[in-house]
Amino acid sequence: CYSDAKGDRMVPLEQLKTQIDALATKKGGLDSVQLTGGEALLHPQFHELLSYLTDHPLVKKIYLPTNGLELNTMDAARRLLVAKSKLMVLLQFDGIHDATDRALRQATPAKVRRRVIAHLEELGVFMQLTMTLTQGVNDEEVGAVVDVGLAHSHIKVIALQPATYSGRYALAPDADTRLTLSDLVKAVSRQAGARVREEDFVPIPCSHPNCGWITLFLRRFGLVH
């Protein structure tokens, strides 16, 4: 999660397999395994690990958070097809403007992200858009990101997460203006093209009602409800 993280220490693949086997056996199965880093696609044995998890009878789902840069070509995206039955790709998608990406990512990958969405849509690989938010930077782009997600049937989840300012960003945190989940709910209901109300959101079953909220959109006959 740190843009300037450096290091080359890696758990050997066989050791990782042993640990996953032991955990899956002890728990009687794993609902999901998330391959994250940094950028997991940079790992030299990433595709070997992906194939192993795909074939593992006790692993139900595989989640892949990514900035999308390593999926810039159709050939690269096609290599994920081995895991299509279990995989969901979680794409960083902080907004639609280059200024947003410069502030949060120190890069401008908007065109790459659109290509990744198009590649995975053609391949039928499920996706999540993950939007990290901070006030005054991209809080007015919530509706636009939700609309992007709703425009593509292979995008199954849109995750909106306020920045935690734990070292990832150089932006100065301000407790008086920090975004909360209720701010995000209001932004979705105010900005998104689809019809949605604040009262449509409900807490997820978590440790605290404000840990996370959720709403569902239903696609029927080409319409979104």
Image: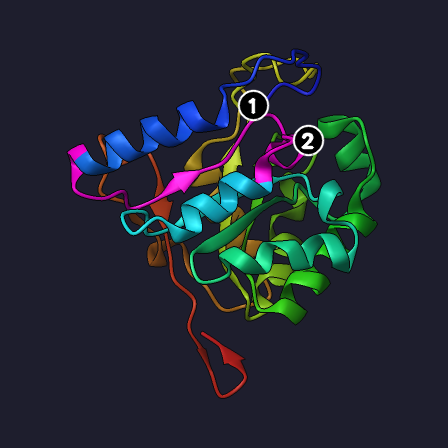
Q: Determine the residue located farthest toward the front in the rendered image.
A: 14
Instruction: Give the class, few, some or many, for how many residues have Cα within 10 Å of label 2's Cα (few <14, many ≥20).
Output: few
Q: Which residues are magenta?
A: 26-46
| Residue where numbered disc 2 is placed | 136
Is the N terminus in the top left, top right, bottom left or bottom right quadrant? top right
Which residue: 68% across, 12% down?
6
Residues at marks 1 and 2 touching, judged by CB atoms closer than 8 Å: yes
Give the SS element for disc 2. Answer: loop
Where is residue 132 shown, x and y percent of the image?
58, 35
Q: Tell me the residue at 39%/32% (across/down).
A: 17
Q: Is residue 147 above or below residue 19?
A: below
N-terminal of the two: label 1 or label 2? 2
Kind of residue at disc 1: Thr
Q: Residues within 10 Å of mark 1 (few under 14, many from 20)?
A: few
**Direction from residue 141 to residue 58 in the image, left or right:** left
| Magenta-drawn stretch, dominant element (helix, strand or loop) | loop
Is 64 one of the magenta-colored residues? Answer: no
Q: Which mark is residue 59?
A: none
Task: List the residue tagged with mark 1.
Answer: 177
